[in-house]
């Protein structure tokens, strides 16, 4: 989940010295936007999900794994301070966007950078193993990226 804090910072999770993009599972029949509500606790009115802004698929040995990036409306630092991450071992940090992106693992960094651009351009980004394959107008609501396009 991409959580902007104002216009210059992102909310990230730190677990055992590694930075992570806050994330959670999407169950069968559940929209990523709906699943995003379960990533954090402590938001009195739920997480202000804006829209899905990126989708990435990676071919693993025996299956394809789809990852979605859902953006929230910008939060204030006070809003972010009320949140706890679903993995209680992790701490939530508010970092400048460039610093957060630079410290993320390669695949997460690629997803975040593509998602930030898609959010700014009001588009939906589609990646294949972290490599941008195409973008579409934000009006698109499909849930799976089409392969090879």
Image (cartoon, rainbow, N blue to C red):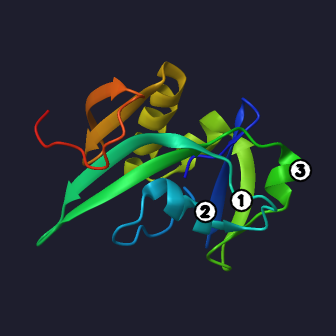
Image side of residue 9 versus residue 49, left or right: right
Give the residue at mark 1.
Answer: 46
Residue 92 image offset from top left, x and y in percent: 72, 61
Q: Residues within 10 Å of mark 2 (few under 14, many from 20)?
A: some
Residue beneath the point at 50% across and 54% down:
33
Identify the mark at residue 78; answer none if there is no mark. Answer: 3
Residue at (77% x, 34% y) in the render: 6
Residue 130 at x, y percent in the picture: 30, 44
- Are the residues tagged 2 and 1 within 8 Å (C-beta)? yes
Task: Give the total of numbered labels.
Answer: 3
N-term-proximal mark, 2 vs 1: 2
Could you tell me which secondary element the residue under label 2 belongs to?
helix
Viewer-side residue, 71 vs 48: 48
Residue 103 vertical position relative to residue 60 in the rendered view, above or below: above
Residue 30: give x, y in percent of width and height.
41, 65
Q: With 83 as the anchor, is 17 left or right in this view?
A: left
Spatial CA distance of label 2 from label 1 is: 6 Å
Of tags 1 and 3, the one toward the viewer is 1
Q: Name the one closer to the observer, 33 or 62.
A: 33
């Amino acid at each position: 989940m991409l959580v902007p804090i104002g216009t210059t910072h992102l909310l990230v999770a730190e677990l055992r010295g590694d930075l992570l993009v806050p994330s959670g599972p999407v169950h069968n029949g559940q929209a990523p936007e709906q699943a995003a509500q379960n990533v954090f606790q402590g938001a009195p009115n739920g997480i202000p999900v804006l829209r899905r802004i990126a989708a990435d698929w990676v071919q693993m040995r025996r299956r394809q794994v789809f990852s979605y990036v859902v953006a929230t409306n910008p939060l204030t630092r006070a809003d972010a301070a009320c949140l706890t991450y679903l993995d209680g071992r992790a701490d939530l940090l508010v970092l400048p966007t460039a610093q957060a992106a630079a410290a993320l693992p390669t695949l997460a960094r690629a997803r975040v950078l593509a998602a930030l651009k898609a959010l700014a351009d009001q588009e939906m980004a589609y990646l294949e193993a972290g490599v941008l394959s195409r973008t579409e107008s934000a009006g698109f609501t499909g849930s799976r990226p089409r392969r090879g396009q």
